[in-house]
């Protein structure tokens, strides 16, 4: 008897986890039992990262110590800076992070799995610096200092990007987006990190694999694609007409639809949409927001598809002055916390991940020697 094949493993329960729930009745989206609504209203990304990695919300002194360690770990080794200078100016920023993560793993490998949290904190601290060192070097020849005293990752990133202390509202908005992006159960990139970890490979190999997986437009790359779509339109009416044409041509509208949130909205979208609206008011980007809302109206009406986390993050990041090709890297900075929690969990409890396939190829046949082919 052959087992049932489920394309894309949709709906398959691949293992147990204590880290998060996605779309579960009564729990919705929650990290270690805390709802995403409470976390985004009450916490900073650093508290959430600590919760994911260590299992509990930090006390004041634990949080201060965690922030202090992250701040002190932001410097990049010289050999890594040299490598970043060699990555071409026209490379995609996701390739820069994938390369940077892999290179850091070669230069500073985990001493042993019992030291895994040191490697995790080092990577969380350096990812924004890797991207922005490369960015400024190629944009203006400047070799920036990647250290900053900003206690929040969101403000640290904006500070290095713009070269000055960021305003409060963009900082808060990016901080919320980081909490929302931090974790989402067995999504494709997390699963990829768990598959790599299941072979007893090292931490940096698992995160490098996850970054490569997140890059695709059906996953993290959707926020960048959503922005490219939204900024094509000068009016909401123009957006409506083009979206109708795209749907007629059966094209995918990036930032809509989700494997798990099929018949209900993605709860992350409501939160990020509200922040996008607030920023639009504060920064005068009203048209961008109105165009986004009209696209949502049309896609929900015509296809019954809801916006996912990536749709309104696109306009939110744009309003914070972040270049479009850095949108998916921002997802990496945050999701690195979730990936790391899953790598730790997989190491502790998981088994080698190795499914099987149903063979539908040719029947057995005689080998043909090279000279007779
Ligand atoms: N725009 C238009 N149609 C879409 C769509 C979208 N964004 N997402 C799904 N559909 C359609 C598919 O074309 C398909 O239609 P069909 O049955 O007529 O062929 C149907 O909905 C089911 O899609 P499917 O790809 O099988 O669903 P999935 O669960 O495998 O895919 C996604 C989930 C996320 C990959 C998919 O919704 C998508 O491609 N979205 C856009 C990319 C994106 O925003 N990704 C970020 C996710 S957080």
Image: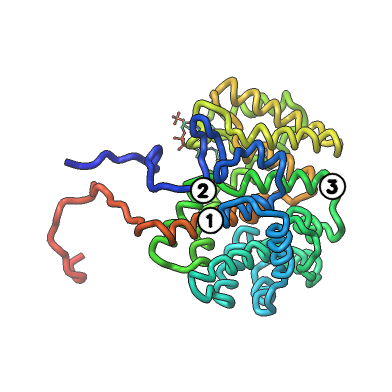
Residue in view at x 52 percent, y 30 percent = 26
Q: Check if mark 2's residue and mark 1's residue have beta carbons within 8 Å.
A: yes
In the rendered structure, the answer to whether residue 261 lies left or right of residue 276 reads left
Q: Secondary structure at mark 1?
A: helix
Mark 3 Cα-neighbour bin, 10 Å: few <14, some 14–19, many ≥20? few
Q: Nearer the viewer, residue 294 or 348?
A: 348
Residue of label 2: 19
In the rendered structure, the answer to whether residue 345 lies left or right of residue 305 reads left
Numbered label attached to residue 341: 1
Q: Position of residue 75 (x, y in %)?
A: 72, 72
Q: Nearer the viewer, mark 1 or mark 3?
A: 1
Which corner quadrant holds the N terminus?
top left
Q: Is residue 324 visible?
A: yes
Q: Position of residue 17 (x, y in %)?
A: 45, 48
Numbered label attached to residue 168: 3
Residue in view at x 66 percent, y 28 percent = 295
Mark 2 Cα-neighbour bin, 10 Å: few <14, some 14–19, many ≥20? many
Residue in view at x 70 percent, y 64 percent = 70
Which comes before the other along the chain, label 2 or label 1? 2
Which comes before the other along the chain, label 2 or label 3? 2
Mark 1 Cα-neighbour bin, 10 Å: few <14, some 14–19, many ≥20? many
What's the distance in space between the residues labelled 2 and 3, CA to CA? 30 Å
Which comes before the other along the chain, label 1 or label 3? 3
Mark 2 sits near ligand 1, with its Cβ under 8 Å away: no
Query: In which quadrant of the rendered view does residue 106 lie?
Result: bottom right
In this view, which residue lies farthest toward the top?
301
Query: In which quadrant of the rendered view does residue 173 lie?
Result: top right
Q: Check if mark 2's residue and mark 3's residue have beta carbons within 8 Å.
A: no
Q: Nearer the viewer, mark 2 or mark 3?
A: 2
């Amino acid at each position: 008897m052959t087992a049932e094949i489920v394309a894309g493993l949709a709906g398959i329960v691949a293992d147990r986890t204590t880290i998060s729930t996605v779309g579960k009745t009564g729990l919705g989206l929650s990290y270690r039992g805390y709802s995403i609504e409470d976390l985004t209203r009450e916490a900073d990304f650093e508290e959430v990262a600590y919760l994911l990695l260590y299992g509990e919300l930090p006390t004041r002194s634990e949080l201060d110590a965690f922030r202090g360690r992250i701040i002190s770990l932001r410097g990049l080794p010289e050999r890594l800076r040299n490598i970043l200078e060699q990555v071409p100016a026209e490379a995609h920023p996701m390739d820069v992070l994938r390369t940077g993560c892999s290179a850091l793993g070669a230069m500073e490998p985990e001493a042993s799995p019992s030291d895994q949290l040191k490697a995790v904190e080092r990577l969380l601290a350096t990812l924004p610096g890797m991207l922005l060192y490369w960015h400024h070097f190629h944009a203006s020849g400047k070799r920036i200092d990647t250290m900053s005293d900003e206690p929040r990752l969101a403000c640290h990133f904006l500070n290095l990007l713009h070269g000055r202390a960021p305003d409060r509202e963009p900082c808060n908005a990016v901080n919320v987006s980081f909490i929302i992006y931090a974790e989402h159960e067995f999504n494709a990139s997390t699963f990829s990190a768990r598959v790599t970890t299941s072979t007893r490979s090292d931490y940096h190999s698992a995160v490098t694999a996850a970054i490569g997986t997140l890059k695709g437009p059906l996953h993290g790359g959707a926020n960048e694609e959503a922005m490219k779509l939204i900024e094509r339109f000068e009016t909401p009416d123009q957006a409506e007409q083009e979206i109708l044409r795209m749907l007629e041509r059966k094209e995918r509208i990036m930032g809509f639809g989700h494997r798990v949130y099929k018949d209900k909205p993605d709860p992350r979208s409501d939160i990020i949409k509200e922040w996008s609206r607030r920023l639009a008011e504060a920064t005068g980007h009203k048209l961008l927001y109105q165009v986004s809302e009209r696209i949502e109206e049309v896609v929900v009406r015509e296809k019954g598809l809801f916006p996912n986390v990536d749709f309104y993050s696109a306009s939110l990041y744009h309003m914070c002055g972040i270049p479009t090709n850095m949108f998916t890297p921002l997802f990496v900075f945050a999701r690195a916390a979730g990936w790391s929690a899953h790598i730790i969990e997989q190491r502790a409890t998981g088994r080698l991940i190795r499914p099987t396939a149903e063979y539908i190829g040719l029947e057995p046949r005689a080998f043909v020697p090279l000279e007779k082919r």
